Amino acid sequence: MVRHIARTLAKMIITLFVIVTLVFFATRLSGDPINYVVGQGITQEDRELLTRYYGLDASIWEQYVRFLGSFVDGQFGLSFVERRPVADIVAERVWPSLQLLLSGIALTILVAIPLGILAAIHRKSWIGSAVMTVAFIGYAVPNFVLAVFMVLVFAFTLNWLPVVGNSTPWHFIMPTITLSGALIAALTRFTRNAMLDVLSQDFMRTARAKGLSEAVVILKHGFSNASITILSVLGLQIAGLAAAGNVVVEAIFAWPGIGALLVNAAILRDFPVLQFAVLAVAFAVIIVNGVIDIAYAYADPRIRLGRA
Amino acid sequence: MPLLSVRNLKVAFGATEAVRELSFDVPTGGTLALVGESGSGKSATALSILRLIEREGGRIAGGTITLHEDLGPVDITALDEPSLRALRGNRISMIFQEPMTSLNPVLTVGNQVAEVFIRHRYMSNRQALAAARDALDSVRMPDPQRRLSQYPHELSGGLRQRVMIAMALACRPRLLIADEPTTALDVTTQAEILNLIRELQAEIGMAVLFITHDMGVVAEIADRIVVLRDGRKVEEGAVAEVFRAPRHAYSQQLMAATPKLGSGSPAAPAGAAKLLEVRDLTTRFTVRGGFLEERRSIDAVRGVSLSLGRAETLGLVGESGCGKSTLARSILRLVEPASGGILLDGQDVMRAGRVELRALRRHAQMVFQDPYASLNPRLPVHDLVTEPARIHGVVTARDQRDLAATLLKSVGLEEDVVDRYPHQFSGGQRQRLCIARALSVKPKLIVADEPVSALDVSIARQVTDLMLELQQREGISFLFISHDIAVIERVSHRIAVMYRGEIVETGPSQAVLRDPRHPYTRRLLASVPRTDPAGRRAFVQPLPAVSSPQPGARLREAAPGHFVRENAA
């Protein structure tokens, strides 16, 4: 188990380094930031002055080394636009994003897994078909359409829920649902299939032959096995949720998180902020995957005991 | 009064009737064997008694199943779900065929056994675990305390089946239903498990309903026998009588088809020239670890030498995991051997390049165990059976159908099935297709890896008869691999016994079987069930484990052509 965790950690660090490098070179290919920092029509001297001021006159390798060096002082350089340490800018955005992400994951697990199990048990009755139909619709509706629809109904028409910002718990409802809608649908479907696979296994018959109640058979013997496959998919899906989902949802609901920051930094070619924001998202995805990797190993004794 | 009376039982799956008007009694404390081939309805009957049949998509369409308990008779077909749950695992228990899949892989052994005590004896967790330890101890599980925290994948097949038995007998049931409990086990393990069931039956005084297709097992364990065919009872009686004089034609056929050890082997072809010579072959598997994990290597086959003459059959026998399949694949270089020499028809297989190897494989074809998995479901029969011939350019597209028809005829199938697909054939017919496919390139050698192990005995008999016939007609040599020594005896001129990657004894079939020299061979032979209830061993002595062969030991000639490993005690 210790070896497994050590391996997982080493993989995480290597992945982060690769991402950092890719992001650095990708941003350099995206255009000259000077054009965005100042308007059109500045003189050639001013342009050169600014280029030197932002350190963009050095060779790309020198910039890369300096970029890696900025990790050491913990400030990650200064924002081109705000002239503040990037670390401070990103830091104040991390918590709102994380809150949204965690509530999205919690809602997904709490809704999708019970629904999926229900759909598997009642696969031949109307309950199963109803759950799967709703899940199918949920999967087909894009998240921004769902968001606009909810805003129209619950904010503008009924006036029940606030739309902008994150100041009260009420503010969480619509962004969380938007964020997790498609994932709930996908995970419900996946949980159902994983459970159906398990329900037909021989050991389920053994469990019933012991005289165990249906609840024990389904939850203890069935779900404990299905959870292994569910976890592996959840890890991948959450990565998508953190990266792409947050950007859209934060833009729609003006959520003061990393996603919104990322969009702005990209538009303004604010390289230091952009690089670090991408890094922060990647870091979150990797952490979540690492945690799920370890949870996965814990759920499956064949991995935990080092004999896959 | 019998413990369990089944009367006019009818079980249906949709519109098909799996069991028709079946009646039998299980005597208190006695053992009844339900015998039949696949599709005979024996498992459906067993699952009906626990009323688990509804879960499998079946339905009890009529009849009664009465359990005569101390408090009076109970009709199981009329019980509600809570009463059934109180009955299952408590008064009536069941063990299943596949010990690999019948235990939950993510729960500890202790948890799974303790569960029964918690459910039926209302014990606390701590009490239940202590009881589970005792239950494991009573099925002669070595080191029971440690087993509690182990998972099923850490145990061997035999130990897993012991866990199943411990679970089933936890509440000292009146009736144990054993559905093919030893079919997936090696023959030495089978002998141990049968012994165990008999001992525990005497201890607890329970009745056993034993479901099997294996007449040898019936002879070992049962008092009475019910023979099923297509869901109907064709014969019932005391085991000794039915074995001495089976009345129904189907029982007679079943008895005749059951391979019996000691019924002789085919005569060796006189002065056969060598076709295959394998010298000192070693095949090593490197278990490659993932990232940051070291490699380990395992010798699956270690220093094996063997030879095979033209039109000769060499039977390779050994238990699961002994390396016999790896050896077969190594000979054709489907798995790359680490060292050693292979001569096929005078040509060096080990040194052959890619092109030469392809040409060589034309002379050596393979037939696999699972006829369901080894035929591409999307190809029609005429494509399937002629595929090797097309690959080796032996047949033109125009002659392909003619060749297919000829091949099908030679394996005893009708010519007009050439346009069908594999799913339209039964298991035995599919194995014939596999053989026809191998024959399409007129090979000199067929390597058959457990070719009849997945088939019912009467079908298996037909397939081995076909192989013998082909050998006589076309002079093909066979390397015939099986875990079943009785089947090996029937088909082989010579036998090689494999144990832990090495050949420990080899020689003419009758020499090896009548005069086994190596302790492992003796142990193997002693474990084979006798198909004669009169000769039933009172209690088989627990067989001593045989230590792993020492590396470097050579084969010594004990009698003409009969070689034994030197370190044999």
Image: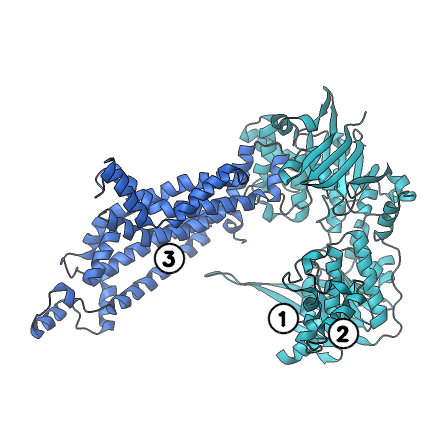
Residue A238 in sight: yes
Left or right for B475, reference B167: right
Return the residue at label 2: B442
What percent of the width, then of the height, locates residue B372? 68, 57
Chain letter for the part of the structure drawn in cyan: B
- Relative to B39, is B135 above or below? above
The image quarter in which residue B166 lies: top right
| Mark 1 crowd level (few <14, some 14–19, many ≥20, 10 Å Cα) | some
Q: Give the numbered dot on residue A12.
A: 3
Q: Considering only order in the chain, which callout, 1 or 2, is on the residue closer to the N terminus?
A: 1
- The amino acid type, in three-letter code, at marker 1 is Glu
Chain identifier of the residue bearing label 2 in the image? B
Say left or right for B144 vs A296: right
> Alpha-carbon distance for marks 1 and 3?
36 Å
In the rendered structure, the residue with mark 1 lies on which chain?
A: B
Can you give x and y, in whole percent of width and height, for residue B370 in the image?
A: 69, 58
Q: Which mark is residue B127?
A: none
